[in-house]
Amino acid sequence: MVEPDPAFAGGSTSEGYDLHHHGDREVGPGLVDLAVNVRLPRPPAWLRQELVSALDSLAAYPATADAVRAVAARHGRADDEVLVTAGAAEAFTLLASALRPRHAVVVHPQFTEPEAALRAAGHAVSRVVLSESDGFVLDPALVPAEADLVFVGNPTNPTSVLHPASSLLSLARPGRLLVVDEAFLDAVPGEVESLAAGHPGVVVLRSLTKTWGLAGLRAGYVLASADVVERLRAVQVPWSVSTLAGVATVACCRPAALEEAEKLAVAAEADREYLVSGLAAQGVDVLGDPRGPFVLVRVPDGASLRARLREAGYAVRRGDTFPGLGPDHLRLAVRDRATTDAFLATLRELS
Protein backbone atom coordinates (compact mmCIF):
# COMPACT_ATOMS: atom_id res chain seq x y z
CA MET A 1 0.00 0.00 0.00
CA VAL A 2 1.29 3.44 -0.92
CA GLU A 3 0.29 6.40 1.24
CA PRO A 4 0.60 9.85 -0.36
CA ASP A 5 2.40 12.65 1.38
CA PRO A 6 0.09 14.09 4.05
CA ALA A 7 1.15 17.67 3.26
CA PHE A 8 3.35 17.92 6.32
CA ALA A 9 6.72 19.64 6.30
CA GLY A 10 8.85 19.73 9.40
CA GLY A 11 8.17 18.69 12.97
CA SER A 12 8.31 15.31 14.66
CA THR A 13 4.79 14.01 14.11
CA SER A 14 2.92 13.04 10.99
CA GLU A 15 -0.66 11.78 10.90
CA GLY A 16 -0.55 10.93 14.58
CA TYR A 17 2.82 9.15 14.51
CA ASP A 18 5.54 10.52 16.77
CA LEU A 19 8.47 9.99 14.41
CA HIS A 20 11.02 10.95 17.06
CA HIS A 21 9.80 8.46 19.66
CA HIS A 22 12.38 5.75 20.29
CA GLY A 23 12.88 2.93 22.74
CA ASP A 24 15.04 4.95 25.11
CA ARG A 25 11.94 6.91 26.11
CA GLU A 26 10.36 3.71 27.43
CA VAL A 27 13.11 2.83 29.89
CA GLY A 28 13.53 4.12 33.42
CA PRO A 29 15.14 3.40 36.78
CA GLY A 30 14.39 -0.07 38.08
CA LEU A 31 12.99 -1.36 34.79
CA VAL A 32 14.32 -4.36 32.90
CA ASP A 33 15.00 -2.95 29.44
CA LEU A 34 13.33 -4.86 26.61
CA ALA A 35 12.68 -1.63 24.71
CA VAL A 36 16.13 -0.66 23.41
CA ASN A 37 17.82 -2.86 20.82
CA VAL A 38 21.34 -2.48 22.22
CA ARG A 39 22.55 -5.96 23.03
CA LEU A 40 25.36 -5.33 25.53
CA PRO A 41 24.89 -3.39 28.80
CA ARG A 42 28.39 -1.91 28.29
CA PRO A 43 31.14 -2.14 25.68
CA PRO A 44 33.43 -5.17 26.06
CA ALA A 45 36.56 -4.75 28.16
CA TRP A 46 38.95 -4.62 25.20
CA LEU A 47 36.94 -1.82 23.61
CA ARG A 48 36.71 0.13 26.86
CA GLN A 49 40.49 -0.10 27.15
CA GLU A 50 40.90 1.26 23.61
CA LEU A 51 38.72 4.22 24.55
CA VAL A 52 40.54 4.86 27.83
CA SER A 53 43.88 4.78 26.01
CA ALA A 54 42.64 7.51 23.67
CA LEU A 55 41.68 9.98 26.40
CA ASP A 56 45.04 11.74 26.35
CA SER A 57 44.45 12.71 22.71
CA LEU A 58 41.22 14.62 23.36
CA ALA A 59 42.93 18.01 23.34
CA ALA A 60 43.36 17.69 19.57
CA TYR A 61 40.54 18.08 17.07
CA PRO A 62 39.24 14.73 15.85
CA ALA A 63 40.40 13.24 12.55
CA THR A 64 38.61 10.41 10.77
CA ALA A 65 41.19 9.20 8.23
CA ASP A 66 42.08 6.07 10.23
CA ALA A 67 38.42 5.19 10.70
CA VAL A 68 37.72 5.67 7.00
CA ARG A 69 40.58 3.36 6.06
CA ALA A 70 39.44 0.74 8.56
CA VAL A 71 35.85 0.75 7.29
CA ALA A 72 36.98 0.66 3.67
CA ALA A 73 39.21 -2.36 4.35
CA ARG A 74 36.46 -4.11 6.29
CA HIS A 75 34.02 -3.90 3.37
CA GLY A 76 36.40 -3.95 0.41
CA ARG A 77 35.56 -0.38 -0.59
CA ALA A 78 37.68 2.55 -1.69
CA ASP A 79 38.42 5.19 0.93
CA ASP A 80 36.44 7.80 -0.99
CA GLU A 81 33.35 5.56 -0.77
CA VAL A 82 33.24 5.82 3.04
CA LEU A 83 31.94 8.58 5.30
CA VAL A 84 32.09 8.08 9.06
CA THR A 85 29.20 9.67 10.93
CA ALA A 86 27.94 10.37 14.43
CA GLY A 87 25.78 7.27 14.34
CA ALA A 88 23.42 6.27 11.58
CA ALA A 89 21.03 9.03 12.66
CA GLU A 90 23.44 11.71 11.43
CA ALA A 91 23.57 9.95 8.08
CA PHE A 92 19.81 10.32 7.65
CA THR A 93 20.09 14.05 8.31
CA LEU A 94 22.98 14.40 5.86
CA LEU A 95 21.06 12.59 3.13
CA ALA A 96 18.02 14.79 3.68
CA SER A 97 20.18 17.93 3.57
CA ALA A 98 22.39 17.02 0.62
CA LEU A 99 19.82 15.49 -1.73
CA ARG A 100 16.96 17.11 -3.59
CA PRO A 101 14.54 14.27 -4.30
CA ARG A 102 11.44 14.88 -6.36
CA HIS A 103 9.69 11.80 -4.99
CA ALA A 104 11.06 10.32 -1.76
CA VAL A 105 9.63 7.02 -0.53
CA VAL A 106 10.08 5.40 2.88
CA VAL A 107 9.19 1.73 3.20
CA HIS A 108 7.32 1.15 6.49
CA PRO A 109 7.11 -0.10 9.13
CA GLN A 110 10.71 0.91 9.76
CA PHE A 111 12.92 3.17 11.84
CA THR A 112 11.24 6.57 11.67
CA GLU A 113 14.25 8.90 11.64
CA PRO A 114 14.67 8.74 7.81
CA GLU A 115 11.17 10.12 7.32
CA ALA A 116 11.56 12.63 10.13
CA ALA A 117 14.81 13.91 8.60
CA LEU A 118 13.27 14.22 5.15
CA ARG A 119 10.28 16.14 6.47
CA ALA A 120 12.44 18.42 8.60
CA ALA A 121 14.36 19.31 5.43
CA GLY A 122 11.10 20.19 3.69
CA HIS A 123 10.82 17.16 1.41
CA ALA A 124 7.52 15.53 0.51
CA VAL A 125 7.45 11.87 1.53
CA SER A 126 5.32 8.95 0.37
CA ARG A 127 5.03 5.81 2.44
CA VAL A 128 4.99 2.26 1.17
CA VAL A 129 3.41 0.25 3.99
CA LEU A 130 4.17 -3.46 3.94
CA SER A 131 1.41 -5.89 4.85
CA GLU A 132 1.31 -7.67 8.19
CA SER A 133 -0.70 -10.47 6.61
CA ASP A 134 2.16 -11.01 4.16
CA GLY A 135 4.72 -11.08 6.96
CA PHE A 136 6.00 -7.57 6.17
CA VAL A 137 7.85 -9.02 3.17
CA LEU A 138 9.16 -6.43 0.74
CA ASP A 139 7.20 -6.26 -2.51
CA PRO A 140 9.31 -4.15 -4.89
CA ALA A 141 6.28 -3.59 -7.12
CA LEU A 142 4.75 -1.39 -4.42
CA VAL A 143 7.47 1.24 -4.81
CA PRO A 144 6.37 3.80 -7.41
CA ALA A 145 8.49 3.82 -10.55
CA GLU A 146 8.93 7.59 -10.30
CA ALA A 147 10.52 7.39 -6.83
CA ASP A 148 14.05 8.79 -7.00
CA LEU A 149 14.98 8.23 -3.34
CA VAL A 150 13.92 5.09 -1.45
CA PHE A 151 14.66 4.18 2.18
CA VAL A 152 14.36 0.62 3.50
CA GLY A 153 15.78 -1.15 6.56
CA ASN A 154 17.43 -4.57 6.45
CA PRO A 155 16.78 -6.24 8.79
CA THR A 156 13.95 -3.85 9.37
CA ASN A 157 13.27 -2.23 12.71
CA PRO A 158 10.72 -3.01 14.21
CA THR A 159 9.61 -6.08 12.23
CA SER A 160 13.01 -7.85 12.32
CA VAL A 161 12.34 -9.08 8.77
CA LEU A 162 15.42 -9.61 6.59
CA HIS A 163 14.77 -8.80 2.94
CA PRO A 164 16.61 -10.74 0.22
CA ALA A 165 19.41 -8.80 -1.43
CA SER A 166 17.84 -9.64 -4.79
CA SER A 167 14.58 -7.92 -3.80
CA LEU A 168 16.45 -4.83 -2.68
CA LEU A 169 18.61 -4.69 -5.79
CA SER A 170 15.49 -4.88 -7.96
CA LEU A 171 14.67 -1.42 -6.57
CA ALA A 172 17.94 0.07 -7.83
CA ARG A 173 17.77 1.82 -11.19
CA PRO A 174 19.26 4.81 -13.01
CA GLY A 175 18.10 8.10 -11.54
CA ARG A 176 17.26 6.61 -8.15
CA LEU A 177 19.19 6.29 -4.90
CA LEU A 178 18.31 3.28 -2.77
CA VAL A 179 19.27 3.80 0.88
CA VAL A 180 19.49 0.58 2.91
CA ASP A 181 19.76 0.91 6.68
CA GLU A 182 21.89 -2.06 7.77
CA ALA A 183 22.24 -0.92 11.39
CA PHE A 184 21.29 -4.38 12.65
CA LEU A 185 22.90 -6.52 9.97
CA ASP A 186 25.99 -7.30 12.01
CA ALA A 187 23.59 -9.05 14.42
CA VAL A 188 22.66 -11.50 11.62
CA PRO A 189 25.05 -14.47 11.37
CA GLY A 190 27.19 -14.16 8.27
CA GLU A 191 25.74 -10.71 7.51
CA VAL A 192 23.73 -12.41 4.78
CA GLU A 193 21.79 -10.21 2.32
CA SER A 194 24.14 -7.27 2.90
CA LEU A 195 24.73 -4.77 0.09
CA ALA A 196 27.77 -3.24 1.79
CA ALA A 197 30.19 -4.53 -0.85
CA GLY A 198 28.90 -1.92 -3.29
CA HIS A 199 26.24 -1.69 -6.00
CA PRO A 200 25.40 1.19 -8.37
CA GLY A 201 22.85 3.57 -6.94
CA VAL A 202 22.88 1.95 -3.48
CA VAL A 203 23.76 3.72 -0.23
CA VAL A 204 24.33 1.55 2.86
CA LEU A 205 24.26 2.83 6.44
CA ARG A 206 25.91 0.99 9.33
CA SER A 207 26.03 1.54 13.09
CA LEU A 208 28.36 0.34 15.86
CA THR A 209 25.70 0.96 18.50
CA LYS A 210 23.76 -2.28 18.55
CA THR A 211 26.45 -4.94 18.80
CA TRP A 212 29.05 -3.09 20.85
CA GLY A 213 26.96 -1.19 23.41
CA LEU A 214 27.95 2.25 22.10
CA ALA A 215 24.67 4.16 21.88
CA GLY A 216 26.14 7.01 23.92
CA LEU A 217 29.20 7.38 21.71
CA ARG A 218 27.42 7.87 18.34
CA ALA A 219 29.47 5.92 15.82
CA GLY A 220 28.38 4.84 12.35
CA TYR A 221 29.22 5.20 8.70
CA VAL A 222 27.95 5.49 5.14
CA LEU A 223 29.02 3.35 2.19
CA ALA A 224 28.21 4.90 -1.18
CA SER A 225 29.68 6.01 -4.47
CA ALA A 226 32.40 8.65 -4.20
CA ASP A 227 30.18 11.39 -5.60
CA VAL A 228 27.43 10.71 -3.06
CA VAL A 229 29.94 10.61 -0.21
CA GLU A 230 31.34 13.96 -1.32
CA ARG A 231 27.86 15.51 -1.35
CA LEU A 232 27.23 14.25 2.16
CA ARG A 233 30.61 15.42 3.41
CA ALA A 234 29.88 18.91 2.05
CA VAL A 235 26.94 19.32 4.46
CA GLN A 236 28.45 17.48 7.45
CA VAL A 237 29.24 19.67 10.45
CA PRO A 238 33.01 19.87 11.01
CA TRP A 239 34.31 17.44 13.63
CA SER A 240 30.89 15.85 14.14
CA VAL A 241 32.56 12.47 14.70
CA SER A 242 34.43 12.49 17.99
CA THR A 243 37.92 11.15 18.55
CA LEU A 244 36.54 8.32 20.67
CA ALA A 245 34.00 7.39 18.00
CA GLY A 246 36.83 7.19 15.47
CA VAL A 247 38.90 5.00 17.79
CA ALA A 248 35.92 2.70 18.36
CA THR A 249 35.31 2.44 14.62
CA VAL A 250 38.88 1.35 13.96
CA ALA A 251 38.80 -1.16 16.81
CA CYS A 252 35.48 -2.69 15.77
CA CYS A 253 36.69 -3.23 12.20
CA ARG A 254 39.65 -5.40 13.23
CA PRO A 255 39.46 -9.13 12.41
CA ALA A 256 39.27 -10.16 16.07
CA ALA A 257 36.31 -7.82 16.62
CA LEU A 258 34.53 -9.13 13.53
CA GLU A 259 35.02 -12.68 14.78
CA GLU A 260 33.58 -11.72 18.15
CA ALA A 261 30.64 -9.97 16.48
CA GLU A 262 29.86 -13.15 14.56
CA LYS A 263 29.82 -15.17 17.79
CA LEU A 264 27.51 -12.60 19.36
CA ALA A 265 25.21 -12.81 16.33
CA VAL A 266 25.02 -16.60 16.56
CA ALA A 267 24.24 -16.36 20.28
CA ALA A 268 21.57 -13.72 19.65
CA GLU A 269 19.96 -15.96 17.04
CA ALA A 270 19.67 -18.79 19.56
CA ASP A 271 18.33 -16.44 22.23
CA ARG A 272 15.75 -15.08 19.78
CA GLU A 273 14.53 -18.57 18.93
CA TYR A 274 14.22 -19.27 22.65
CA LEU A 275 12.12 -16.12 23.13
CA VAL A 276 9.91 -16.92 20.13
CA SER A 277 9.31 -20.44 21.43
CA GLY A 278 8.41 -19.15 24.88
CA LEU A 279 5.99 -16.60 23.46
CA ALA A 280 4.36 -19.24 21.25
CA ALA A 281 3.83 -21.46 24.29
CA GLN A 282 1.69 -18.66 25.73
CA GLY A 283 -0.23 -18.16 22.50
CA VAL A 284 1.62 -14.98 21.56
CA ASP A 285 2.41 -14.97 17.87
CA VAL A 286 5.55 -13.28 16.65
CA LEU A 287 4.88 -11.42 13.41
CA GLY A 288 6.89 -12.01 10.26
CA ASP A 289 10.08 -14.07 10.16
CA PRO A 290 12.38 -12.36 12.67
CA ARG A 291 16.09 -12.38 11.87
CA GLY A 292 17.34 -9.50 14.02
CA PRO A 293 17.92 -9.13 17.78
CA PHE A 294 14.28 -8.19 18.46
CA VAL A 295 10.79 -9.43 17.64
CA LEU A 296 7.44 -7.79 16.89
CA VAL A 297 4.25 -9.11 18.44
CA ARG A 298 0.59 -8.12 18.36
CA VAL A 299 -1.48 -8.73 21.47
CA PRO A 300 -5.03 -7.79 22.48
CA ASP A 301 -5.17 -4.47 24.32
CA GLY A 302 -1.47 -3.94 23.81
CA ALA A 303 -1.39 -0.48 25.39
CA SER A 304 -2.82 -1.86 28.63
CA LEU A 305 -0.41 -4.81 28.63
CA ARG A 306 2.52 -2.47 28.07
CA ALA A 307 1.43 -0.39 31.07
CA ARG A 308 0.99 -3.48 33.26
CA LEU A 309 4.38 -4.82 32.21
CA ARG A 310 5.88 -1.49 33.20
CA GLU A 311 4.25 -1.72 36.62
CA ALA A 312 5.73 -5.22 36.91
CA GLY A 313 9.21 -3.90 36.10
CA TYR A 314 9.58 -4.36 32.33
CA ALA A 315 9.97 -1.72 29.62
CA VAL A 316 8.87 -2.78 26.14
CA ARG A 317 8.73 -0.72 22.95
CA ARG A 318 5.34 0.60 21.91
CA GLY A 319 4.53 -0.02 18.26
CA ASP A 320 2.03 2.72 17.50
CA THR A 321 4.70 5.31 16.67
CA PHE A 322 5.70 3.27 13.59
CA PRO A 323 3.60 4.00 10.48
CA GLY A 324 1.67 0.85 9.65
CA LEU A 325 1.44 -0.38 13.24
CA GLY A 326 -0.98 0.28 16.08
CA PRO A 327 -1.29 0.19 19.88
CA ASP A 328 -1.55 -3.61 19.96
CA HIS A 329 1.93 -3.97 18.47
CA LEU A 330 4.90 -4.31 20.83
CA ARG A 331 8.58 -4.77 20.05
CA LEU A 332 10.65 -6.94 22.38
CA ALA A 333 14.44 -6.89 22.46
CA VAL A 334 16.17 -10.26 22.61
CA ARG A 335 18.01 -10.78 25.88
CA ASP A 336 19.79 -13.67 27.62
CA ARG A 337 17.74 -16.69 28.64
CA ALA A 338 17.56 -15.83 32.32
CA THR A 339 16.04 -12.45 31.49
CA THR A 340 13.69 -14.05 28.97
CA ASP A 341 12.53 -16.68 31.48
CA ALA A 342 11.75 -14.01 34.07
CA PHE A 343 9.91 -11.90 31.49
CA LEU A 344 7.86 -14.85 30.23
CA ALA A 345 6.88 -15.74 33.80
CA THR A 346 5.69 -12.17 34.36
CA LEU A 347 3.83 -12.16 31.05
CA ARG A 348 2.08 -15.39 32.04
CA GLU A 349 0.97 -13.87 35.34
CA LEU A 350 -0.44 -10.81 33.59
CA SER A 351 -2.33 -12.74 30.90
Image (cartoon, rainbow, N blue to C red):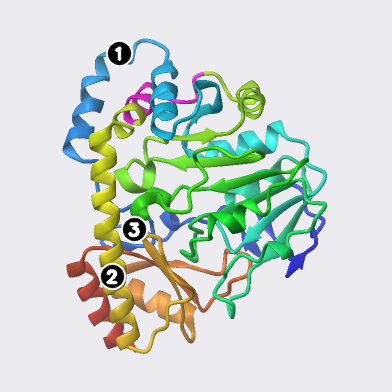
Q: For the residue labelled by badge 3, is the local secondary structure a helix, a strand or a loop?
A: loop
Tally the numbered discs: 3
Quadrant of the image containing the C terminus: bottom left
- The residue nearer to you, when weighing 121 against 181, is 181
What percent of the width, then of the height, locates residue 260? 23, 44
Residue lying furthest top in this view?
Answer: 60
Q: Residues within 10 Å of mark 3 (few under 14, many from 20)?
A: few
Q: Is residue 266 visible?
A: yes
Residue at image mark 3: 28
Mark 1 touching mark 2, by CB under 8 A?
no
The residue under the point 61% across, 37% down is 93
- The residue nearer to you, when weighing 19 against 146, is 146
Give the number of the mark in front: 1 or 2. 1
Q: Is residue 11 visible?
A: no
What percent of the width, then of the height, locates residue 132? 58, 76
The residue under the point 44% across, 17% down is 65
The amino acid sitting under disc 2 is Gly
Q: Residues within 10 Å of mark 2 (few under 14, many from 20)?
A: some
Magenta region, residue range: 239-248
Q: Magenta stretch: dominant SS?
A: helix
Residue 243 among magenta residues: yes
Sequence-wise, which precedes: disc 3 or disc 1?
A: 3
Residue 113 among magenta residues: no
* Distance of label 1 from label 2 (alpha carbons): 41 Å
Mark 3 touching mark 2, by CB under 8 A?
no
Residue at image mark 2: 313
What percent of the width, then of the height, locates residue 256? 22, 36
| Residue 162 disc label | none
Vertical comparison of 44 with 321: above or below: above
Residue at image mark 1: 57
